[in-house]
Amino acid sequence: MAQLRTIAKCASVAGLLCCAQARLAVAFPTNDEANPSFVPVGADLSQPDAEELAHQMGLTSGFASLGSAQGWTILPRISLEEEFTDNINEVPSPRRWDLTTIVAPGVAVLGNSNDAQLRLNYEPTLEIHLRTGDQNVLAQQLNAVGTLTIVPDLFYVDVRALAGVQATNGGIGGLGGLGQPGIGGITGNSLVSATGGGTVGLAKQNSNETSSFSISPYTLFHFGDLATARLSVSLTHANTSAVTGFAPMPFVDQGSNDQSLSSIQESAQIQTGDQFNRFRDTFSANGYQSSSSGVGVSSSTRDTVNNRIDYQINTPFDIYGQLGWEDISYSGDNVLDIHDVTWGVGTVFTPNPDVSATVGYGHQNGTNAATASARYAVTARTVLTAAYTNGVGTQLEQVANQLNLAAVGNNGNLVNANTGGPLFTGNNALGVEPGIYRYSTLTLGLTSVLPRDTLTLTVGRSEETRTGTGVPNTTNGVTTPSFTWTHLFSPVLSSTLAAWYNKGTPVAGTSTNSMVAALSLQYTLSDTVSTFARYNYYKVQSSSAGQSWYQDLFLVGITKQF
């Protein structure tokens, strides 16, 4: 039966592609979250008048002002910091103070040409401690999203990468972040510095270096307003390792609690175009094979076919229905097999460029669930975003899937390309654990840019339930509201106040409440030099023995851009 289904899938794809060559179908699909368009949808938020808010650009690094410029800009920088903490090991007792010297060279690359687009921000961070040498570490922070045009209108290569340090035990949202350098892009970013980006303040024994890299060559075939087809192959490698040595390296297995994932995905799509007026048909067939090492799953396969029909009721409203089949198998420490029909219904609402919303419900990944995403530019200064996603897979697969949805935002960090909202909201909230999970993530965000203030409010809820044979179906979940306020006192002086609260079960059997508060001041000495000072307070209350602690952290530093 499985062989017959495979033959049917191949025949369906071949038949549809032949029909397309005979001038049958499409428009390039922008609704495929697993394989987003090479032109990100909604990646950049609507901005107020550039001249009126010119003073804000120093607060959002140079990505905002340079990201759309034609040509290439490479901006190296270096930050030197001195840190004092009263609990370097992050333990209940004995509390141990320490002085830390931090050296963080970095580079921002912004490229925009006819043949390539790239946004990259890389920052290795060296921490040398005066009293506690076993906490010395050289960690990596990286994000990159790029597209190469090999043959215009035909052949492209999409490249994505991230690396960062996250809390092994979870329960500390707001500290560190995947793909979020701690100092920021161009003149030093007060917002990111205030939040404790990178590894600052995170004890080595509670640190995992996590990374993901993917390269996806794909071809597009345009058939006028009849159809568009796409064929692609995606190669992905992701891993996470406990930080035990001095220099944990991204993309390399290094020690205890290793998890590693290598995968290849083949995808074919065809979509009808404007010739069919109010109707749009999208057919897709995907194959996925992965192998894992370290703790957890050893291999998996995922084969799916799906056909979706959209009908545009009127200009703002689109309704859709879809039907397909999925074969999903995981082997290793616990086994999961899903072989069933998939279906879904939903609506897409786009009344104007400032409002977009998609809501759907259906059966996929072996269960019934809803999905949603929305973006609403209330004004040119205020944007609301929302996203609800779910699926089944390992934590590393979740990281790779989120990276596929990423764009680099105006502050140099990764955002959801469909909404402009936050990405990786579960990072540092849920702990690092092996296994197969049914997961769901709800993210609500608000960003408002005023003449002298930037306000950001985010509420995230992340849940994961262990699934598969031979394991208890435990559920971990954390709710994380956060608030950030950046205020401009003058063109050269700004402050940032930030706070997070986390409540839930970050790892199996452990209840945790935590709070992070931060206050930062940044003073710009010149176009290429800025100084900053900040105070961070962390408090964690955990039901697990030895994991309740608090910490005060003071830091001063200077950033030089070359």
Image (cartoon, grey):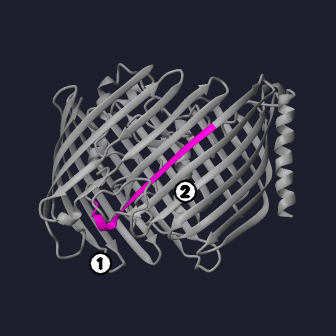
Q: Which residue is mark 2?
A: 398
Q: In terms of depth relative to the viewer, which is nearer, 234 or 70?
A: 234
- Give the quarter of the image for residue 191: top left
> In this picture, is 537 found above or below 284?
below
**Tag 2: residue type?**
Gln
Q: Which residue is mark 1?
A: 546
| Res 88 seen here | no
- Give the quarter of the image for residue 31: top right
Residue 120's label in the rendered image is none
Residue 555 percent coordinates (x, y)? 17, 50
Please state the extent of the stretch shown in magenta in the rendering: 202-217
Q: Secondary structure at mark 1?
A: loop
**Tag 1: residue type?**
Gly
The chief SS type of the magenta part is strand
Residue 176 percent coordinates (x, y)? 34, 54
Cα separation between marks 2 and 1: 29 Å
Membership of 187 in magenta stretch: no
- Between label 2 and label 1, give the one nearer the viewer: 2
Membership of 213 in magenta stretch: yes
Q: Secondary structure at mark 2?
A: helix
